[in-house]
Image (cartoon, grey):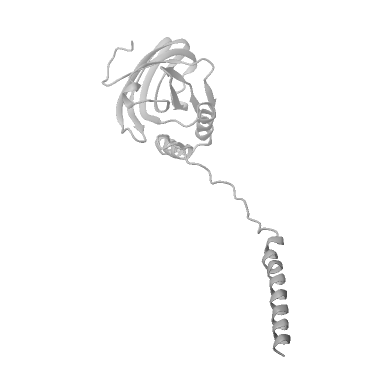
Amino acid sequence: MKIALRVTAVAIVGVALQAAPAVAQAPADQPPPTQSVQAPPPQPPPSNRFSADELIAAGHHFFGSVSRGLAMVMQKAFSQWGLPNGYILGEEAGGAFVGGLRYGDGTLYTKNAGDLRVFWQGPTVGFDAGADGARTMMLVYNLPRTAAIFERFGGIDGSAYFVGGFGMTALTANSIVLVPIRSGVGLRLGANLGYLKFTERPTWNPF
């Protein structure tokens, strides 16, 4: 009787040992759960650059109207030169008959280098006639430090762009690109070539 019980117990243990690997392998045969892949969120601009929304909002507030033309001009600048790390808001006046002069003053705004009062002046030469006074917004690209703005910026050929009562041109000096944006009252008749010289204090000398 004892022998029979022992044989029966051994048989039960053997069956259990054979069944254990099968149970352990069962989950491995199931396909792994699927995971949804989400697109990464849009990256913000570098900390020292202004976003397109910030600049368009500042432009609308500065010019005093919500203009589709202003947004289109600014988007044109963004597509060509990207996002600036500074911008200038100011007022300027000028006049010309073939040759002319332009004077202005405003404030340079940056993300992490503070703000700076600036003045600018310069001659223009070309098919140009009239007088104007206007608010001006200038996008500033590749500015290494605020004091680097005190340079003489010359025009970039073929950079003029006009739409919806706003216009922009582009100036450059030492890899810095300056994009003045003016409202309709500041767009003189004709096309001109010239430069803008930025100074720490106002001066009547445009050269």
179 vs 60, nearest the viewer: 179
Estimate the x, y position of residue 118 in percent, counting from the top left.
Answer: 31, 25
Estimate the x, y position of residue 158 in percent, counting from the top left.
Answer: 54, 17
Query: Residue drawn 39% across and 30% down?
Result: 86
Residue closest to the far bottom = 1
140 vs 45, nearest the viewer: 45
Estimate the x, y position of residue 72 in percent, counting from the top left.
Answer: 54, 33
Above or below, 119 against 115 in this view is above
- Horizontal side of 201 relative to 42 (left or right) equals left
- Horizontal side of 114 relative to 138 (left or right) equals left
Above or below, 30 against 150 in this view is below
Estimate the x, y position of residue 3 in percent, counting from the top left.
Answer: 71, 86
Query: Residue drawn 48% across and 37% down?
Result: 52
Q: Quadrant of residue 134?
A: top left
143 vs 8, nearest the viewer: 8
> Where does the C terminus fall, quadrant-wise?
top left
Q: Quadrant of residue 93?
A: top left
